[in-house]
Image: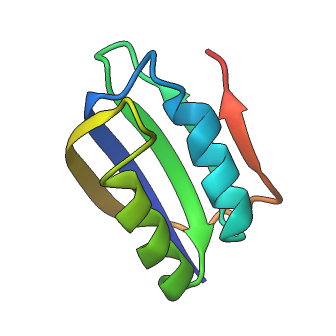
Amino acid sequence: MKHLNLIIHGKVQGVSFRMATQSVANLLKIKGFVKNQPDGTVYIEAEGTAVDLDHFIDWCQEGPENAVVENVEQIEGEFKNYRNFEIVKK
């Protein structure tokens, strides 16, 4: 199991990115959270197997239908053992 911090750049707010991310994370058994940042990016902390995280990152590079993802920053972090995947509202 590993932990990744992801920063999604592009047109990623106002396009249901967080809700879609939660759905995909639940399908892939990814734990963590997603939240909008004041600078217009979306921040995700994701934990899961390397294979599941690879699939999750592949999805993040596309995002939901109306998103325009320009870049996905990936930073490995310390495993926090999240129990589910949540949308943080502020």
Q: Nearer the viewer, residue 50 or 60?
A: 60
Q: Quadrant of residue 8?
A: top left
At 48% from the left edge and 65% from the top edge, which residue is drawn? Answer: 56
At 34% from the left edge and 32% from the top edge, which residue is drawn? Answer: 67
At 42% from the left edge and 54% from the top edge, which residue is drawn? Answer: 5
Q: Quadrant of residue 52?
A: bottom right
Q: Residue 71, how many percent across, how many down?
A: 18, 46
- In the rendered picture of this protein, how many numbered marks are placed on residues? 0
Residue 8 as seen in the image, left or right of residue 44: left
Q: Quadrant of residue 16?
A: top right
Image colouring: rainbow
Q: Residue 49, how many percent across, how many down?
A: 58, 83
Q: Residue 50, how many percent across, how many down?
A: 49, 85
Q: Residue 29, how many percent across, how many down?
A: 72, 70
Would residue 17 be visible to someone looking at this image? yes
Residue placed farthest to the left in the image?
70
| Quadrant (top left/top right/bottom left/bottom right) for the C terminus | top right
Residue placed farthest to the front in the image?
65
Q: In the image, is residue 22 above or below residue 31?
A: above
At 46% from the left edge and 74% from the top edge, which residue is drawn? Answer: 55
Residue 49 as seen in the image, left or right of residue 26: left
Q: Nearer the viewer, residue 25 or 65?
A: 65
Would residue 77 be visible to someone looking at this image? no
Q: In the image, is residue 28 above or below residue 60?
A: below
| Quadrant (top left/top right/bottom left/bottom right) for the N terminus | bottom right
Q: Nearer the viewer, residue 56 or 49?
A: 56
Q: In the image, is residue 2 above or below residue 81?
A: below
